[in-house]
Image: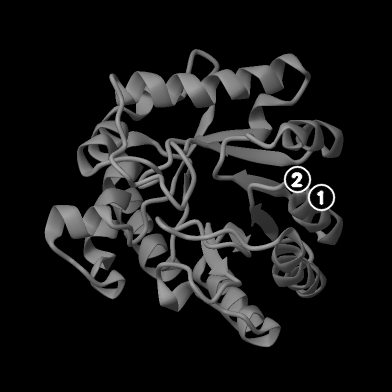
Amino acid sequence: MGVINCTPDSFHKDSRSEEIEQSLTIVEKMIQDGADWIDIGGESTRPGATEVSIEKEIERTAPLIREIRKKFPNQAISIDTRRHQVAREAIIAGANLINDVSGLRDPEMLGLVLSSDVGVCIMHMQGEPRNMQNSPIYDDVVKEVSSSILNKARELVELGHPINRICLDPGIGFGKTLEHNLSLLRNSEAFRGSEGFSLLWGVSRKSMFRDLLGREETNQRLAGTLGVAAYAQNKGIDILRVHDVAEHVDLCRTISSLELN
């Protein structure tokens, strides 16, 4: 899943693109490089970020989704949003999946998922972007995070949403310390549940690599990111949300080739 942030303030500047033509050029290269999904976001949810208006978020995302759908009619597109109004406009524009970093906190988001029959990624976040990294605390991070998103996924299934249109994301860096993040990555099996839900990891260039490796700048964090991607391939993670599509496709193809009998 390749990332496009239609924002001026997302944490990794190379993922930002505020002009549609520039964004389309980036999208085309990501598709050529092997991206299965293109993830469009119009609100930065980095630690400390402030909210943008619903209208601004729609203005940033829906026109680009329409253009991607027009130019690449078969491309899978996700909308990265916490708000049902933004998600609804994105679906109308052509999005196939709602990538909700708040885990469907918006009470109308669950109904939208059911009524529109799109895919959904349910991510865990403790707190809000503006305060989520202010001393996050858990008694048992794996148990609490997995229970939260599994319960929401099971609610959707009970209401009739197909399991194969649901994926779960532990929310690395969203209200977690480095040790919380490492525990969540080590224990991915806890998130599949008995149902075998698909899993998505979004770890690309995040601050865990500052804390783990001392890499202050996001453009220094590709090697650490690829290390997690190699681990993810070994763990059978279904989707990797990344800034660097070509490098991740090369990594995964190489590992797959080595594993062939």
On the image, the x and y values in percent for residue 246 come to 42, 70
What amino acid type should be assigned to the residue bearing mark 2? His
What amino acid type should be assigned to the residue bearing mark 1? Arg
Q: Is residue 196 visible?
A: no
Which one is in front, 246 or 50? Answer: 50
Badge 1 vs badge 2, beta-carbon distance below 8 Å: yes
Q: Is residue 33 above or below residue 110?
A: below
| Residue displayed at 58% across by 69% down | 31
| Residue displayed at 43% across by 23% down | 146
| Residue displayed at 63% across by 34% down | 105
For mark 2, what is the residue? 84
> Alpha-carbon neighbours of circle 2 within 10 Å: few (<14), some, or many (≥20)?
many
| Residue displayed at 68% across by 57% down | 77
On the image, the x and y values in percent for residue 245 come to 45, 66
Coloring scheme of the render?
one colour
On the image, the x and y values in percent for residue 204 come to 37, 58
